Amino acid sequence: MSSSTPSPAPAPPSEPTGVSLGTYDRRQSYQWNYDHVPAAVDIPVPEIAGAWTFCGQPCRSPLGVPAGPLLNGKWVLYYASLGFDVLTYKTVRSIERPCYELPNLVPVVTGPLRGDETEVPSCGEMNGSWAVSFGMPSQPPEVWRRDIEWTRRELASDKLLNVSVVASIQDGWTIDDTADDYARCARWAAESGADSVETNFSCPNVSTADGQLYQVPEDAGLVAERVRDAVGATPFVIKVGHVTDPEQASRLLEAVVPYVDAIAMTNSVAANVRLADGNLEFDGQRRGICGAATLDASLEQTRLFADLVHSGEHDVALVGVGGASSADDVSSYLAAGAESVHIATAAMVDPLVAQRICAEWGSRHGC
Ligand SMILES: Cc1cc2nc3c(=O)[nH]c(=O)nc-3n(C[C@H](O)[C@H](O)[C@H](O)COP(=O)(O)O)c2cc1C
């Protein structure tokens, strides 16, 4: 349910006896976390009764993990074992890219964000929301392509592997070069066995100095068409940032809908982060705020797009992303028009969140 205050911080993980549950350690580097992956567990996850789909493919539940927490195939298998049914492999590129320096995750204190906030204060302890600063690192393509092949072989056949890709824009590139780079990565992901490919359009756009791709409909449409040509019939999702203007949403939708199966929203809500010493974190650059503080904004955006999809009779699914951490949040996204609901922050804080949501769902809706 959309509320005027963000959901409280997820309860700390209550480990079932004899099961060891690891989490991403935000005090360690991306590479450390890439190398230290918790082993898959064997825990009971109640079924969420219903006929669920993701991009038209049958799925055991509407629950997924969006691009971010799943750094490689072992992380995919761990979260699959925790009850998630759509597993998104963290965004990869056509070239190797290092991660930004620590800190990569900075907890913040804020109420629901609307997108017009200039800054939010940091805090020492995680309270449901954080600023995310990784810079979309990527292993070299030969590494992630092999890993995706391995992951698809190891993953249960009733779980879906979604692979997120992004272009690595170079000086002097045109939008055509960017489209080709997206298409190259998307084709590699599909060839490696991805059940669906997701392109992150929350990335700088080359034909406008300051915009992002999802903010420039004609360029987004051009890239989407090129990716569709590259992946053939493989289900294709685009991930977009925060959109509040109906006119902008409508133009984006019209531009991409001929080529895509689904649109995932919202990547994050951007803001500066003010440290306790008065300075701005990240050299004063804005970062995406993720977690509970974005729930209302993402739900509102899902409703906006769902209305436009309905009125335009468009054939495209929506994936709700942002701030979900409970069965009520999942219900709200489904009621808003989402086909599937993906959870990053709450799943990183509480690895048992899918199990808890499934149990809450059963007690509210019956099994
Ligand atoms: C640690 C972390 C890393 C992320 N990395 C990516 C990424 O590589 N690509 C992407 O499209 N989104 C990325 N995101 C954004 C998430 O996919 C998601 O849109 C966002 O976290 C909102 O969901 P949440 O509130 O459940 O965290 C990342 C988020 C987190 C928390």
Image (cartoon, rainbow, N blue to C red):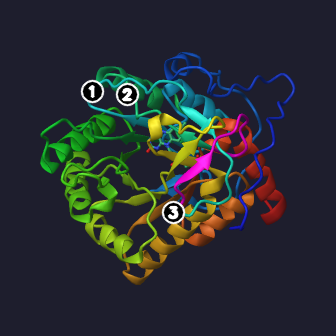
How crowded is the residue under tag 3: few (<14 C-alpha within 10 Å), some, or many (20+)? few
- Above or below, comparing residue 230 to residue 255 in the picture: above
Residue matched to label 3: 116
Query: Which residue is farthest right?
Result: 17
Q: Secondary structure at mark 1?
A: loop
Q: Residues in magenta?
A: 117-129
- 41 and 308: which one is in front? 308
Instruction: Kindly identify the amino acid type of the residue bearing the numbered disc 1.
Output: Ile
Q: Earlier in the sequence, mark 3 or mark 1?
A: 1
Would residue 220 be counted in the magenta stretch? no
Q: Residue at x 69, y 39 (%)?
A: 123
- 296 and 16: which one is in front? 296
Image coordinates for residue 334, horizontal then vertical, percent: 61, 66
Q: Looking at the image, can residue 348 be seen?
A: yes
Q: Residue at x 76, y 45 (%)?
A: 10
* In contact (CB < 8 Å): disc 2 and disc 1: yes
Residue 138, disc:
2
Instruction: Kindly identify the amino acid type of the residue bearing the numbered disc 2.
Output: Ser
- 148 and 69: which one is in front? 69
Q: Residue at x 84, y 30 (%)?
A: 16
Residue matched to label 1: 95
Image coordinates for residue 134, horizontal then vertical, percent: 46, 33
Res. 156 image quadrant: top right
- Above or below, comparing residue 352 to residue 213 in the picture: above
Would residue 128 be counted in the magenta stretch? yes
Mark 2 or mark 3, whichever is nearer to me: 3
Instruction: Kindly identify the amino acid type of the residue bearing the numbered disc 3.
Output: Asp
